[in-house]
Amino acid sequence: MFLTSRRVIIVVFVSVVVLLVLAPDVQAAVTGACSNCHTMHNSQDGSVLDATVNDTLLVSSCIGCHSSSGSETIVNFGPTRIPIVFNTTGYPTKPLAGGNFYDVAAAGGNIDSHGHNVYGISNQDSDLDHAPLDLWGGGCTNSCHASLAMPKSSMTDTQIDGCKICHQKYKHHGTDIAEGSMETEESGWYRFLGGHDARYGGGIVMLTSYVAGIEDADWEQDPTLGHNRYQGAVTNHNDNVLLQTTHSISAFCTGCHAQAHMNTEDAASGVWLRHPTMIRLPTTGEFADYNPETDYDASVPVGWLDPTTPTRSDAVVTCLSCHLVHGSQYPDMLRWDYSAMTAGGGDNETGCFKCHSSKDS
Ligand code: HEC
Ligand code: HEC
Ligand code: HEC
Ligand code: HEC
Ligand code: HEC
Ligand code: HEC
């Protein structure tokens, strides 16, 4: 009797504390019973210890939690919403901001060009033996510059594999950030994204190699409710833009695709050899038609020099303006079907034409 009521009191007390701590939860930190996600001895019901044990006593791997055999892209798990990046039975109709890995998986047909091939989801890319447009050659063989689908044990230069290569700052128990505010170190930065400074030999991860930004609460599952605000940067065509100083989403990509932006072959000429990224979206000419400050189109996103104060003149082109990062349904991980972008093909407001508004007519 006594024990029971004391237990009730403890339970009530614990719940109140949990509620107090978690109630103003806007996003970011996980919620729910520890046992939903962690296992203490990894041997419940006498089962044999799993040799491929997950980090931090988790019941699942990154992919295990973030994939689903259904078509939903946000799965409710007790009080927790799990963002799904890999739907194993079909490309979802409402993919999250990063797209979906379905097409690069065996079930999706192993279409390597539709996404990043990631360890645990797909084999190594059969066409690409390293990141295209990388400053390839110097000591990065068997590293994440070669493939993101290599098991850690085969790598010579890194200590992590799969999802963690990009999401180096993961912090599921990080602090919650008020909606509309910039992510912080305590919250795991923008979508837990970050890079490393030097080689992994010493295991050094730079504290300053993170991506900044403002996160949409439903990962853009429904972009009419709100959208991410990416950190942009403006640079000269041949500058080596560093993640450590700009914290921009494009600098994150150029960590592995350095020449997507740079003109390293001809640094002096000032001519763009590749489509410009990290430049302001001009407010004049054909670009005047797209005003992302007042009428943002999440299928052709831009970055902002100051995401807390999005200003039309400070809107910049980013890698994500044209690409999805996990995977898409089109070659080169493009957001839209490039082969359908036909000059003079009639009224069209999608893809290239969102910015190049006069090239359709
Ligand atoms: C036990 C289940 C579980 C595991 C394992 C797990 N996650 Fe998560 N993850 C979640 C949940 C739940 C959320 C959503 C938290 C929230 O409400 O914002 C989340 C959110 C995320 C986000 C989005 C963060 C944001 O800012 O919205 C990323 C990125 C992520 N996880 C990456 C990873 C990586 C990388 C791993 C492996 C190291 C991993 N997850 C392992 C459950 C899991
Ligand atoms: C919805 C899933 C989820 C729930 C519920 C959850 N965790 Fe976690 N926890 C994770 C994930 C995923 C990681 C590993 C990735 C990371 O650190 O971001 C983690 C990491 C940890 C870590 C190591 C990293 C750190 O932040 O210190 C501890 C300790 C931890 N959890 C304790 C707990 C305890 C105690 C509870 C219950 C009060 C709990 N967790 C509930 C998902 C969860
Ligand atoms: C090549 C780098 C890269 C790899 C590899 C990668 N991610 Fe991501 N991920 C990103 C970026 C960049 C974003 C932010 C996308 C945005 O906001 O447009 C993101 C966003 C997310 C989100 C938030 C939902 C969304 O779509 O915005 C989750 C959850 C997530 N990633 C989990 C994973 C898991 C699990 C894996 C491994 C299966 C993984 N990621 C592999 C770069 C990567
Ligand atoms: C950690 C290194 C790394 C980062 C960071 C990274 N990539 Fe990649 N990327 C690769 C590798 C390796 C390949 C080649 C193998 C593959 O496709 O998985 C690749 C392939 C690609 C391809 C060609 C896809 C194909 O298979 O034909 C595109 C497009 C691309 N990345 C865009 C991006 C964008 C955009 C970002 C930033 C949001 C980014 N990458 C960040 C390593 C990276
Ligand atoms: C204006 C749209 C646009 C922007 C911005 C853009 N890309 Fe691309 N990207 C494309 C298109 C279209 C292709 C298809 C091939 C082509 O036309 O060159 C492509 C192809 C690629 C490839 C594959 C190249 C190959 O050889 O297989 C990679 C890698 C890539 N982009 C990375 C990036 C990165 C990193 C950034 C940011 C620095 C970026 N892209 C910015 C449109 C864009
Ligand atoms: C997010 C906006 C945006 C999108 C989407 C976009 N562009 Fe651009 N594009 C620009 C900007 C900005 C410039 C530079 C204009 C300037 O400074 O005069 C540019 C310049 C160009 C140039 C001229 C480059 C040069 O050397 O002068 C070409 C060609 C081009 N884009 C083709 C495309 C194609 C093809 C697509 C679709 C795959 C595309 N763009 C998508 C914004 C965009």
Image (cartoon, grey):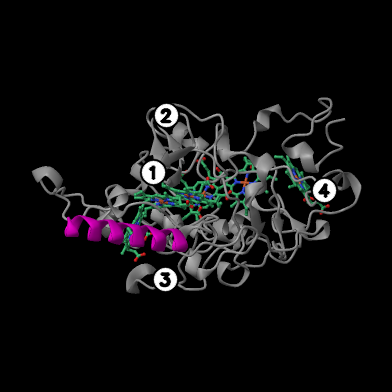
Which amino acid, mark 1? Answer: Gly
Q: Which residue is mark 1?
A: 78
Nearer the observer, 139 or 312: 312
Quarter of the rendering occupied by the C terminus: top right
Q: Is residue 100 left or right of residue 12?
A: right
Q: Which residue is mark 3?
A: 205
Residue 70 badge: 2
Q: Position of residue 335 (x, y in %)?
A: 62, 38
Q: Is residue 139 left or right of residue 260?
A: left
Residue 6 inside the magenta-drawn segment = yes
Q: CA distance from mark 3 to mark 4?
A: 38 Å
Q: Position of residue 139 (x, y in %)?
A: 40, 64
Q: Earlier in the sequence, mark 1 or mark 2?
A: 2
Q: Earlier in the sequence, mark 3 or mark 4?
A: 3
Which amino acid, mark 2? Answer: Gly
Look at discs 1 and 2 and give the one toward the viewer: 1
Q: For the residue labelled by badge 1, is the local secondary structure a helix, a strand or a loop?
A: loop
Tell which residue pokes out farthest to the front in this image: 1
Q: Earlier in the sequence, mark 4 or mark 2?
A: 2
Which amino acid, mark 4? Answer: Asn
What range is drawn magenta here?
A: 1-21
Q: Which residue is mark 4?
A: 291
